[in-house]
Image (tube, grey):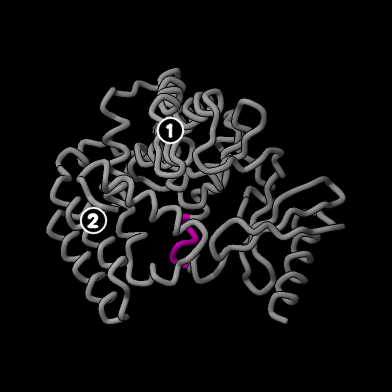
């Protein structure tokens, strides 16, 4: 019943605020907590996105508005990302009861399979990623005092993993789960935090993985979902895109990854050491996201894929067993 009420409110707001009459709607399953629909209206096809109040509290709304505003600016600058519908200069809208939503152009294309981007798609993705970074860091947004992602010290990471192990033991988890934690504990000793801190800070997408890409032919059709945009590490974007495009079934295709770097360098300089540092940076930031006490209950979906990537990165950088 709550869903029916919300849908009625959304369609009423679409009609009153944006002049859209919904003729048909198909739910889209990608995304976390937020809800999306592909809608056919009197003005064409769009994607309607409703923002979950638990994920986007009132305190986070200014960040969301900024992110959507930047998506619109990037689109207007020619980047391949969806145009948002505006009303009175606003791209984040509300229903009568305060449900927040946005409406953006529906983009043609397919979500790529994990690790299967072609050399041409990777080159194009590298160029688009660099163009996005160039525009986001052109001075319009200024800068902040520190990146959003705080890099733990090795001691802090070991303390965190000790806590995960303790929680798993209290759950009665099988030894295989404890070995996963141990592999990341071993890898932590090989990570040079000073090297990671050399990664230049800047405004970044922060969620540039395959579910937020559309491909068509031998190119990229669109970059999607800028909701997490923040001042952070642009190299994290690079690493996430590289893993989505080049890593599958325990193998990372470095030859294809070189096409991403070549595309990036058509827009911005990229040091030779950037790829390796970016992958280490992603590992250090995301390990604590996916190696967690409740991972024993995550048997499918993105957490499983990301946990597998953490295992591979642990083997690559520290000799962990994964």
Q: Is residue 194 left or right of residue 240?
A: left
The reply, left or right, for residue 106 in relation to residue 279 is right
Q: Nearer the viewer, residue 34 or 178?
A: 178
The residue at the point 34 percent across, 51 percent down is 310
Q: What label does residue 184 carry, if any?
A: 2
Give how far across and how far down residue 249 sits, in percent.
45, 44
Q: Which residues are magenta?
A: 58-63
Q: Nearer the viewer, mark 2 or mark 1?
A: 2
- Image quadrant occupied by the N terminus: bottom right
| Label 2 crowd bin: few (<14), some (14–19), many (20+), radius 10 Å | many
Q: Which quadrant of the structure image shows residue 59? A: bottom left
- 2 or 1: tag closer to the N-terminus: 1
Query: Residue at left 79%, top 61%?
Result: 16
Tell me, yes or no, if residue 100 can be seen here: yes
Name above or below for residue 173 compared with residue 198: below
In front: 237, or 322?
Answer: 322
Left or right, 246 with reference to 318 = right
Q: Position of residue 115 (x, y in %)?
A: 49, 39
Q: Please say if the residues under marks 2 and 1 sit with CB atoms less than 8 Å apart.
A: no
Q: Which residue is mark 1?
A: 133
Say above or below: 145 vs 125: below
Q: Is residue 289 magenta?
A: no
- Mark 2 to mark 1: distance in Å? 31 Å
Q: Residue furthest front?
A: 175
Q: Is residue 141 visible?
A: no
Given residues 262 and 57, the one toward you in this image is 262
Q: Position of residue 14 (x, y in %)?
A: 76, 59
**Residue at 49 percent of width and 61 percent of height:** 61
Callout 2: SS: helix
């Amino acid at each position: 019943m709550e869903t029916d009420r919300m849908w009625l409110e959304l369609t009423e707001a679409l009609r009153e605020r944006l002049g859209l009459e919904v003729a048909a709607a198909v739910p889209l399953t990608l995304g976390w907590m937020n809800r999306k629909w592909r809608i056919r209206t009197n003005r064409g096809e769009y994607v309607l996105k409703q923002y979950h109040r638990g994920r986007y509290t009132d305190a986070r709304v200014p960040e969301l508005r900024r992110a959507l505003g930047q998506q619109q600016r990037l689109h207007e600058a020619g980047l391949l990302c969806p145009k948002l519908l505006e009303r009175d200069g606003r791209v984040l809208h509300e229903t009568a009861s305060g449900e927040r939503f946005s409406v953006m152009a529906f983009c043609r294309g397919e979500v790529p399979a994990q690790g299967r981007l072609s050399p041409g798609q990777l080159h194009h993705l590298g160029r688009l990623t660099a163009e996005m970074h160039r525009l986001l860091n052109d001075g319009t947004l200024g800068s902040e005092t520190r990146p959003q992602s705080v890099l733990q010290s090795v001691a802090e990471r070991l303390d965190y993993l000790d806590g995960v192990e303790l929680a798993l033991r209290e759950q009665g988890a099988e030894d295989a789960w404890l070995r996963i934690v141990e592999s990341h504990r071993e890898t932590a000793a090989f990570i040079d935090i000073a090297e990671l801190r050399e990664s230049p800070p800047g405004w970044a997408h922060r969620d540039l993985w395959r579910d937020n890409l559309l491909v068509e032919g031998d190119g990229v059709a669109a970059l999607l979902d800028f909701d997490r945009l923040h001042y952070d590490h642009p190299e994290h974007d690079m690493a996430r895109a590289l893993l989505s495009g080049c890593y599958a079934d325990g193998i990372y295709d470095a030859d294809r990854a070189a096409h991403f770097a070549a595309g990036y360098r058509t827009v911005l300089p990229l040091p030779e050491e950037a790829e390796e540092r970016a992958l280490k940076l992603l590992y250090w930031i995301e390990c604590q996201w996916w190696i967690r006490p409740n991972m024993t209950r995550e048997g499918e979906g993105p957490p499983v894929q990301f946990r597998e990537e953490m295992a591979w990165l642990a083997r690559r950088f520290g000799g962990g067993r994964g």
